[in-house]
Amino acid sequence: MESTNTLSMEDITTRIDQALDNIRPYLETDGGNVKILEVTDDLVVKLELLGACGSCPMSTMTLKAGVEEAIRRAVPQVKAVEAVNITHPDDPHAKLPDNML
């Protein structure tokens, strides 16, 4: 397994983006998507949830069970995955995608 010393930040970001490309069709099915905002020097991935993902009460579960899992499989060195705009289930503006109603 390669260490972060042998992977450039560009390589890490490319691998993360490729991992996200593998799950994007599932997010897009529900009207959402995800965008990398930053990969910090200490390997924390900061994401923005787009479209329906930005207002869905299931976004916490999607982030942890889907997005973070895919990223960690591609780049095990990643320390954490955070969404800057995560929607919490008790948010009064949260709404499920139409196909989940």
Image (cartoon, rainbow, N blue to C red):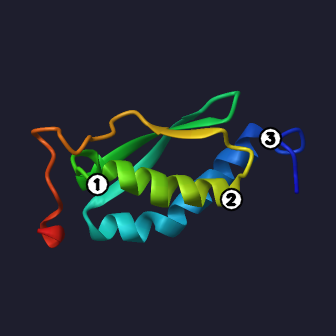
**What amino acid is labelled 2 in the image?**
Ala
- The x, y position of residue 40, in whole percent, is 63, 29
Q: Is the residue marked by circle 2 packed among few (<14), some (14-19), or many (20+) residues within 10 Å?
A: some
User: Where the C terminus falls, by quadrant?
Assistant: bottom left
What mark, if any, has residue 8 been given in the picture?
Answer: 3
Secondary element at image label 3: loop
| Percent position of residue 55, x then y | 21, 46
Which residue is rendered at x = 35% and y = 46% of the image?
49
What crowding class fits label 3: few (fewer than 14 Cα within 10 Å), some (14-19), or many (20 or more)? few
Q: Are discs 3 and 1 less than 8 Å apart at CB? A: no
Q: Relative to 88, does residue 64 appear above or below in the rendering? A: below
Distance, label 3 to label 2, CA atoms, is 14 Å
Q: Amino acid at mark 3?
A: Ser
Q: Quadrant of residue 62?
A: bottom left
Total labels: the figure holds 3
Pointer 2 residue:
74
Query: How many neighbours does mark 1 have within 10 angstroms: few (below 14), some (14-19), or many (20 or more)?
Result: some
User: Residue, x 40% and y 70% (percent of image)?
Assistant: 25
Specify the label residue 58 is tagged with.
1
Q: In the rendered image, which quarter is residue 71 located in? A: bottom right
**Horizontal and vertical percent position of residue 24:** 43, 64
71 sits to left or right of 24? right
Residue 72 in the image, given as x and y percentages of width and height = 64, 54
Taking depth in this image into account, of 97 and 20 the one nearest to the observer is: 97
